[in-house]
Image: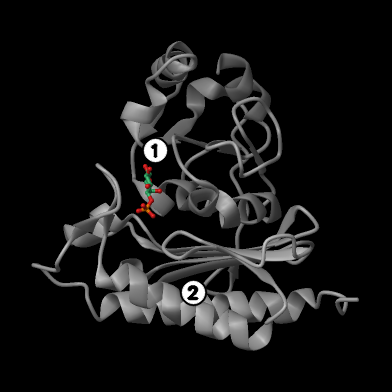
Amino acid sequence: MAPPLDLAHALQVACRAASAAAEAALRHFHPGIKVEFKGEKSPVTVADREAEQAILSIIRAEFPQHGLLCEESGCHGAGAESRWIIDPIDGTRGFIRGGLFWGPLVALEHEGDIVVGAMTIPTLGESYWAARGMGCYRNGEKLQVSACSEWSQATLSMGELDRLLVQPWDQGVLRLVRTAQSTRCYGDLGGVAMVLAGRADAWIEAGVQAWDLAPHKILVEEAGGRFTDFTGLPTVASGNAVATNGVLHAHVLEEL
Ligand code: IPD
């Protein structure tokens, strides 16, 4: 039988892994990096691969019995009761173009629930982490979502528009955009970070994978907010996500 999960230790490992990935990626953060394509629209670089290796070597040394789901190297140890979900660089396209909003995402799923999450935005010097029941932090400062309760006063943070403005939710997305106080597309992990810090009140994203969303669920929940898919299920597996301050969640789901 596997030993009980030590959440504080898992959180410390997640933070260490995210920070090692950030360092590996920064070594390649310069113009002219060679870009390959995994599919028509999905670029990958040596930075993605080295950042993933940096994460894997830390996690494997600490938790050799855990499963892994990784953006670049796939799935290992399927069926384990604990599984790490890893995106070595969320926002690879921004990274390639010298943008600000990119960074590693590391999450631990235990018995089907995301219980630990860490993400880093190296260009801003910001590291976020959370574990079930332990709160959400940015560089050691405890975070709390906003208290905004009126959609007409809300700031909506959005992901990739060409995936959000498709049926069946395009009309709902447009209604949310037209009735919010403001709408901003910060991009990739930067979009959800705005909600964690109370700088935006809701974030929506679609057309993504579990590794693009995994740590966000626990980060948002521990900052006092709510995270679901577009139908209201608390999962990172549907390919779409709504993260809000909690108060506005029902309204966003209703419109979608
Ligand atoms: C991408 C980001 C982006 C989303 C893309 C993803 P990646 O992740 O999450 O916000 O719109 O669909 O592929 O590939 O840079 O890790």
Label 1 within 8 A of ligand 1 by Cβ: yes
Is the image coloured rainbow, by chain, by secondary structure, or in one colour? one colour
> Which residue is tagged 2?
18
Q: Secondary structure at mark 1?
A: loop
Residue depicted at 87% across the width and 79% down the height: 3
Q: 10 Å neighbourhood of mark 1: few (<14), some, or many (≥20)?
A: many
Dots 1, 2 in contact, CB < 8 A: no
Residue depicted at 34% across the width and 46% down the height: 187
Residue 212, image x and y in percent?
A: 48, 51
Between the residue at mark 1 and the residue at mark 2, the CA separation in whole angstroms equals: 22 Å
Residue 20, image x and y in percent?
A: 44, 82
Q: Amino acid at mark 1?
A: Gly
Q: Which mark is residue 242?
A: none
The single residue placed furthest to the left in the displayed view is 32
- Where the C terminus falls, by quadrant? top right
Q: Is residue 14 left or right of residue 37?
A: right
Any part of residue 12 in sight: yes
Any part of residue 135 in sight: no
